[in-house]
Amino acid sequence: MTSHDRTPLPRFDQQDVEHIEDEPLHRGFFNLDRINVRYRQYQGGWSETIQREVFRHHDAVGVLLYDVERDAVVLVEQFRAGAMGRAFSPWLLEPAAGLIDSDESPEEVARREVQEETGCEAEQLIEMHRYFPSPGACDEYITLYCALVDSGDVGGIHGLEEEHEDIMVRVLPFRDVWGMLEDGTINNAMSLIALYWLARERPALRARR
């Protein structure tokens, strides 16, 4: 099949994968498994049994806080080990976020994490997107929200000491945040997805005033 072939492709789903076996490689806060699977192929038939290593990650939520009246965005800044040696700084600006590691709903986790990380109350949550951030190697699934807040008294250092969190809350004009997106200062997927959504929806959100 070439890139110019207009033949409709089959739509595969979970029934088109045979999950043969998992081999645990690591057990800790996160897990790592080697999976053995085979799956239906586009040209017909099944693949051979293949092995893939999959990082088992809790699902997560992210919440971009937006102050309509001030046209300001609330972001959290914290150290991220995965960015060490890969960017100008491993302190990243991101939406408030957290893992779903209990029987709480995504909405409940979102509100709790916003309170813990920023001190804000996220009463109204607008769902932006649900997505896999890195499905080639990780099973994490993220629900991303926007919350409309009053940022007048927001700021300072937040986070839970028992989780070794050291979070600085930044309240920034939208135009400044967009400039940091364009110059690469903001360089993580959750922020990019959320801010592109906000850029599209911002006129409608501000029209609610």
Image (tube, grey):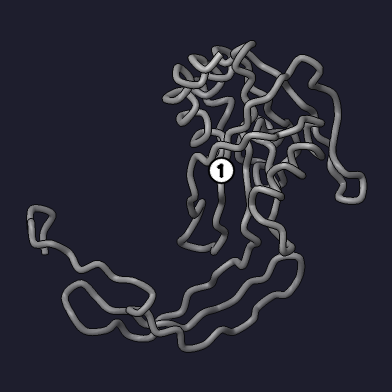
Q: Residue furthest right?
A: 161
Q: At 13% from the left edge and 54% from the top edge, which residue is drawn?
A: 3
Residue 12 coordinates in the image, percent (x, y): 29, 70
User: Is residue 53 depicted above or below 80 in this figure?
Assistant: below
Q: Secondary structure at mark 1?
A: strand
Residue 133 coordinates in the image, percent (x, y): 51, 51
Q: Is residue 176 left or right of residue 116?
A: left
Q: Is residue 49 left or right of residue 130?
A: left
Q: At 20% from the left edge and 68% from the top edge, which residue is drawn?
A: 10
Local packing at callout 1 (Cα closer than 10 Å; few below 14, some 14-19, many 20+) is: many
Q: Nearer the viewer, residue 169 or 197?
A: 197
Q: At 71% from the left edge and 49% from the top edge, which residue is drawn?
A: 109
User: Is residue 27 depicted above or below 138 in this figure?
Assistant: below
Q: Quadrant of the N terminus?
A: bottom left
User: Is residue 48 depicted above or below 149 in this figure?
Assistant: below
Give the quarter of the image for residue 174. Answer: top right
Q: Quadrant of the C terminus?
A: top right
Residue 120 coordinates in the image, percent (x, y): 77, 30
Residue 148 coordinates in the image, percent (x, y): 63, 26
At label 1, the amino acid type is Leu
Q: At 50% from the left edge and 26% from the top edge, which residue is drawn?
A: 198
Q: Which residue is mark 1?
A: 144
